[in-house]
């Protein structure tokens, strides 16, 4: 395929597939808004701006993403973490996306495996179970036995998945650009920015070396904790496309018995583990559902699947600790300030309305006993509140909310009396006391002084550069037009069609004049040049008509 072709022609078949799936799911207004009619067969073209209700729209979008495959499923899962820019009904639907597909036959991946491992395929691996123990859109897992008789799990990427996702990413970027130029979404949703973020996250997920590094860091963070761990990774056998790690022998948390003797210990341990990951380590497992947690040796928690992790800066860790402290103790002003420091507020932000609405939310909960307070319900209300006030928050903020809500649900399944807020209150009090130690304050003060000095130096350099340009009379102001690419493209198409029409008209007029002469040679008793002119004009006219019909704009 010629890579110099425009994006929307280079992957015409995939665009056509996307357009037809949109039509099948009743999302014709997207076809119209993004000018996708040209990718549909003529009989299936539609022209409608009818938009379904929010609930129906969210369901249909989920079904479209599911039908479109791996890249779009992953995109939907990313969007499910953006409760600051999408309404709750949309977030709820995106969380239902299932990344489960049938496994590739082992024969189809064996050649890929041999090529990836080279000589190690024979020297380091004794046996591979042909039947996959798990399969998702990007990879599948198999049990293997290594040369030292060690039982391990091999996660292998599906062959050609990189190319498929690369094509879909290019299409997403093109559609996002069009959506932004045509103002398809409200101002808080920035499609181009979302797809850039998605490209970064999917690129990381496609490179198993990133997941390997995540596991190694997690194990190091909890090296001194005998009850929290993750699988050992065989880094010498792992590559960007294959990850081989220790097979965990234990019980998945979702299958643990209600009568297990250490349920209360495990529930509290899981919550404290998550808080340590977030508020101390600044690195946390962002998908701690019961299928990703094993219980080994009766009361050791072993986390698996580190494809999705969150990272938090030191300053954000302090803010998160402060946020939970304020939330638990109903410190409205502190909570409000932390949210505004972490997020970006819109131009028309109303601080008074923000405070009143926040108080209204918290008043719903603080009349009840702390033991009856459900953190999941508080977080859901807080997410909707942030969305309503159009505060753009870091993705990690919502990943954390979800992780804590999952931890609460898991803990209560293990121990009906478990209360994540009680555990959190004790943990955060210890953290705040630790942060208030003199040596810690001096350390942070030193960091802030350094940051101030660095900013001052940068500002001085910028000011010096500005003054130098003024003195040298070399100061220029650059103006940049934005969002005019689509208009320019349209003008190009219009001018090309007008030029073609003029050429056709000239050919017809010239040929008509030639026909009136006795010029030789002749064909069908008319001058040959006149016949050629009419024929050429007819061919160009037909091509012009086909082009107009294919565009869907007539």
Image: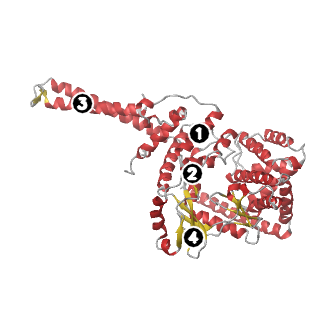
- Residue that badge 2 annotates: 196
Label at residue 61 = 1
Label 1 neighbourhood size at 10 Å, few (<14), some (14-19), many (20+)?
A: some
Q: Is residue 276 left or right of residue 164?
A: right
**Depth-wise, is mark 1 or mark 4 nearer the camera?**
4
What residue appears at the point 62 percent right and 66 percent down from the top-left corner?
213
**In this rendering, does residue 471 appear at all?**
no
Residue 428, how many percent across, how many down?
A: 83, 59
What residue appears at the point 44 percent right and 64 percent down from the top-left corner?
111
Residue 124, how many percent across, how many down?
A: 53, 74
Residue 197, how many percent across, how many down?
A: 59, 52
Considering the numbered disc 2 on the image, is that residue within a helix, a strand or a loop? helix
Considering the numbered disc 4 on the image, is that residue within a helix, a strand or a loop? strand
Please report contact status of discs 3 and 2: CB closer than 8 Å, yes or no: no
The picture quadrant where one finds residue 318 is bottom right
Q: Is residue 392 left or right of residue 174?
A: right
The colour mode here is secondary structure
Q: Is residue 385 left or right of residue 235?
A: right
State how many labels appear: 4
The picture quadrant where one finds residue 554 is top left
- Residue that badge 3 annotates: 507
Marks 1 and 3, the one that precedes in the sequence:
1
Between the residue at mark 1 and the residue at mark 3, the CA separation in whole angstroms equals: 50 Å
- Residue that badge 4 annotates: 145
């Amino acid at each position: 395929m010629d890579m110099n072709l425009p994006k929307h022609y280079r992957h015409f078949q995939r665009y056509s597939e996307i357009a037809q799936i949109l039509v099948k799911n009743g999302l014709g207004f997207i076809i119209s808004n993004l000018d996708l009619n040209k990718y549909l067969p003529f009989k299936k073209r539609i022209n409608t701006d009818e938009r379904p209700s929010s609930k129906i729209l969210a369901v249909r979008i989920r079904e479209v993403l599911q039908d479109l495959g791996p890249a779009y499923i992953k995109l939907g899962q990313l969007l499910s973490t953006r409760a600051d820019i999408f309404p709750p009904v949309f977030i709820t639907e995106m969380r239902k996306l299932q990344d489960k597909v049938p496994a590739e036959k082992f024969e189809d991946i064996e050649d890929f495996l041999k090529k990836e491992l080279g000589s190690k395929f024979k020297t380091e691996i004794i046996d591979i179970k042909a039947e996959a123990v798990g399969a998702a859109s990007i990879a599948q897992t198999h049990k293997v036995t290594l040369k030292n008789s060690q039982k391990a799990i091999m996660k292998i990427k599906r062959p050609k998945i990189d190319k498929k996702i690369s094509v879909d990413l290019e299409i997403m970027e093109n559609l996002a650009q069009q959506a932004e130029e045509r103002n398809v979404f409200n101002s808080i949703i920035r499609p181009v920015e979302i797809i850039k973020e998605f490209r970064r996250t999917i690129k990381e997920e496609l490179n198993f070396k990133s997941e390997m590094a995540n596991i190694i860091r997690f194990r190091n963070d909890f090296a001194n904790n005998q009850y929290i761990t993750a699988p050992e990774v065989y880094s010498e056998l792992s590559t960007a496309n294959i990850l081989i790690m220790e097979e965990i022998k234990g019980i998945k948390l979702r299958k643990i018995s209600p009568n297990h003797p250490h349920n209360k210990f495990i529930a509290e341990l899981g919550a404290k583990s998550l808080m340590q990951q977030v508020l101390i380590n600044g690195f946390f497992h962002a998908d701690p559902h019961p299928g990703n947690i094993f219980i080994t040796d009766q009361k050791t928690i072993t986390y698996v699947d580190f494809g999705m992790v969150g990272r938090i800066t030191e300053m954000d860790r302090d803010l998160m600790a402060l946020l939970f402290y304020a939330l638990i103790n109903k410190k409205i002003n502190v909570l409000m300030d932390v949210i505004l420091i972490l997020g970006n507020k819109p131009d028309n932000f109303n601080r008074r309305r923000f405070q009143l609405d926040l108080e209204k939310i918290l008043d719903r909960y603080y009349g009840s006993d702390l033991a009856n307070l459900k953190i999941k319900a508080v977080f859901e209300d807080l997410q909707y509140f942030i969305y309503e006030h159009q505060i753009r928050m870091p993705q990690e903020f919502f990943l954390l909310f979800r992780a804590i809500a999952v931890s609460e649900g898991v803990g209560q399944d293990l121990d009906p009396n478990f209360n994540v807020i009680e555990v959190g209150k004790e943990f955060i009090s210890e953290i705040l006391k630790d942060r208030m130690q003199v040596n810690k304050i001096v350390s942070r003060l030193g960091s802030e002084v350094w940051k101030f000095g660095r900013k001052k130096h940068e500002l001085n350099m910028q000011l010096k550069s500005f003054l130098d340009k003024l003195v040298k009379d070399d100061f220029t102001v650059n103006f940049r037009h934005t969002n005019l690419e689509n208009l320019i493209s349209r003008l190009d198409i219009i001018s090309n069609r007008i030029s073609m029409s003029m050429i056709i008209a000239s050919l017809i007029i010239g040929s008509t004049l030639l026909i009136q002469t006795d010029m030789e040679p002749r064909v069908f008793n008319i001058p040959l040049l006149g016949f050629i002119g009419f024929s050429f004009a007819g061919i160009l006219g037909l091509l012009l008509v086909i082009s107009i019909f294919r565009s869907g704009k007539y």
